[in-house]
Structures are given as C-alpha cells and as structure tokens.
C-alpha cells in the first residue's frame, strides 16, 4: 500500500516537496531514475538493496538510504522480507550535513523523527511547515559528530572493493587498526546490523544479480563474490533465499 502527499510551498532553507510511505511487494523495484531534489527513505521494517554510483548496498530496518539530486539510483525490496519505508523529498538552499554524502545511514534517534513526519497525515493544514520543522530536527541530528564515523566509511569502502577477494571481518578490523570486538560493536551501532551479516548479504546480492541479470552459472557467480567452494555457497544461498541457486535462477531469472 502506497500513501503520498505532495507539498511544496517554496520555504527557505529546507523546503519539503513530497512525503509518503509504502509497504512494498516482494522484489518491488524503482529505477534506475534521477531526481531533481533530495530524497531520504527510512526503513521501518524489512530489508532491500540500494544502488548508487554503481555500488549496491544492503539496507535494513532502521537504515536511511540517501538519494541526492541528479544522481542515478535504483532500489529493490527483498524477495523474502520486503521493506516498509517512509520517505521525504526536499530542496535545500541551506548547508547540509556531511553525513548525507554516504549512501546508507543508521541513526537510532532518526526513527522518532520520521514517525513525527508520519503524523502529518493527521493534519488538515500546515503540512509543509510541520515537515520542514522535522527536517531541521533531522539535519541537526545528522550534523552531530559520531565517534567512529571515519572507521565506518573505511570499512564500507573495504567491503565494497574487496568482497570478491573473500575479505573477512578480522582482516577489515586489522586494516583499520581496531580490535575485532570493538569494530563489530561500532559497526552494529552505526549500521543496525553486524558487519558479518552486512558482508554476507552484500556478497549474496552481488551473486544473485550475476546469476539472474547476467546469467552467470552459480559456480562462476560464487567465485566472483569470494566463494571458492560452490557447495558452501549453495548452502548459504539457500539458507538466505530459500532456494538453491539453480532453482532460484529458474524462477527469478530475467
């Protein structure tokens, strides 16, 4: 179910132009598309994937995925646990937080702000001003310095650039000069998911795309995302997607 409001009163600073929510069907996708304004999606439940600047990122409940203006993006709900999200689109002539440079954010306090935004459905008037107030509150939150932000960005970059080489969480922690337990706690607090789960989902989604879009055989896809053992890959893939790779491709291949 999709609900959307269009609001645009050309407010100074931060100007809301649209707001809405949607419970997506399994594998529901949007894009590739380019917007002329900022768009932030907050995931209430479920999960999916978000592609920006050629890189695909797993997105979980509690995450915000960031769509800047004039940048091509694509996003798709998970086939098993599709997401339910709310979004707000806005234009800005104010300076925005550096955090919005990252494709996926996790701020625990953001959920309450997006819930406030949802309350605008109950308002008969003043929606733009109400949403603008929520946006200013959100920008203030994103502006705050969070310990470990640099480590998180470096870790995500390592995962994106070396998932195909079988990089491990221990290796990532070592490269960052961090204790593994501390790194795992830091990552979970900022992304809402353990680093091992994030890396696993990243690999499996890359493999799934190789098989269903580019028609690579499972063994080739497995090797391309860092799995040298096709049997291990098949077991993990089936546990995640509910079907063995070949059966999954028969049902979902384009």
Image (cartoon, helix red, strand yellow):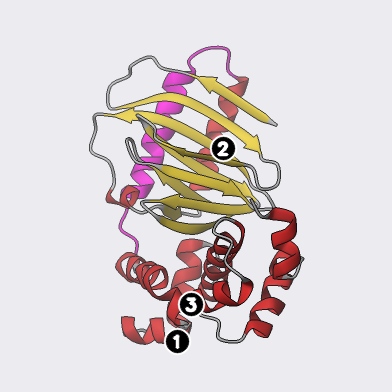
Q: Which residues are magenta?
A: 123-147
**Residue 58 image position (x, y, % from top left):** 53, 59
| Residue depicted at x 35% and y 29% | 36
**Secondary element at tag 1:** helix
N-terminal label among 3 and 1: 1
Q: Disc 1 marks which residue?
A: 170
35 displayed left or right of 84: left
In front: label 3 or label 1? 1
Q: CA distance from mark 3 to mark 1?
A: 10 Å
Closer to the camera in the image, 38 or 179: 38
Label 3: few (<14), some (14–19) or many (≥20) C-alpha neighbours in 10 Å: some
N-terminal label among 3 and 2: 2
Q: Disc 2 marks which residue?
A: 86
| Residue depicted at x 43% and y 31% | 89
**Secondary element at tag 3:** helix
Q: Disc 3 marks which residue?
A: 184
228 displayed left or right of 182: right
Check residue 20 for magenta coloring.
Answer: no
N-terminal label among 2 and 1: 2
Q: Is residue 62 visible?
A: no
**Residue 253 image position (x, y, % from top left):** 66, 55
Label 1: few (<14), some (14–19) or many (≥20) C-alpha neighbours in 10 Å: some
Q: CA distance from mark 3 to mark 2?
A: 28 Å
- On screen, 150 above or below 99? below
Say which quadrant the N terminus sits in: top right
192 displayed left or right of 137: right
Q: Quadrant of residue 35?
A: top left
Q: Check contact, mark 2 vs mark 1: CB within 8 A.
A: no
Check residue 143 for magenta coloring.
Answer: yes
């Amino acid at each position: 179910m999709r609900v959307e409001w269009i609001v645009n009163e050309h407010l100074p600073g931060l100007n809301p132009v649209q707001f809405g929510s949607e419970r997506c069907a399994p594998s529901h996708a949007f894009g590739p598309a380019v917007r002329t304004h900022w768009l932030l999606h907050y995931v209430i439940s479920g999960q999916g994937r978000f592609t920006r600047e050629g890189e695909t990122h797993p997105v979980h409940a509690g995450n915000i995925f960031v769509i800047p203006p004039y940048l091509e993006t694509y996003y798709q709900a998970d086939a098993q646990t599709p997401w339910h999200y709310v979004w707000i689109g806005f234009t800005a002539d104010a300076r925005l937080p550096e955090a919005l440079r990252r494709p996926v954010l996790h701020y625990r306090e953001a959920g309450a702000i997006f819930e406030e935004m949802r309350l605008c459905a109950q308002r008969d008037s003043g929606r733009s001003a109400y949403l603008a107030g929520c946006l200013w509150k959100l920008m203030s939150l994103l502006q705050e310095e969070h310990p470990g932000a640099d480590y998180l960005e470096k870790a995500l970059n390592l995962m994106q650039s070396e998932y195909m080489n079988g990089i491990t969480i221990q290796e990532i922690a070592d490269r960052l000069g961090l204790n593994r337990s501390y790194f795992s706690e830091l990552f979970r607090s900022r992304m809402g998911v353990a680093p091992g789960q994030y890396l696993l989902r990243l690999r499996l989604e890359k493999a799934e795309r190789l098989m269903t879009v580019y028609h690579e055989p499972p063994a080739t896809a497995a090797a391309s995302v860092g799995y040298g053992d096709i049997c291990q890959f098949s077991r993990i893939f089936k546990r995640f997607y509910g079907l063995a790779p070949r059966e999954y491709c028969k049902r979902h291949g384009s």
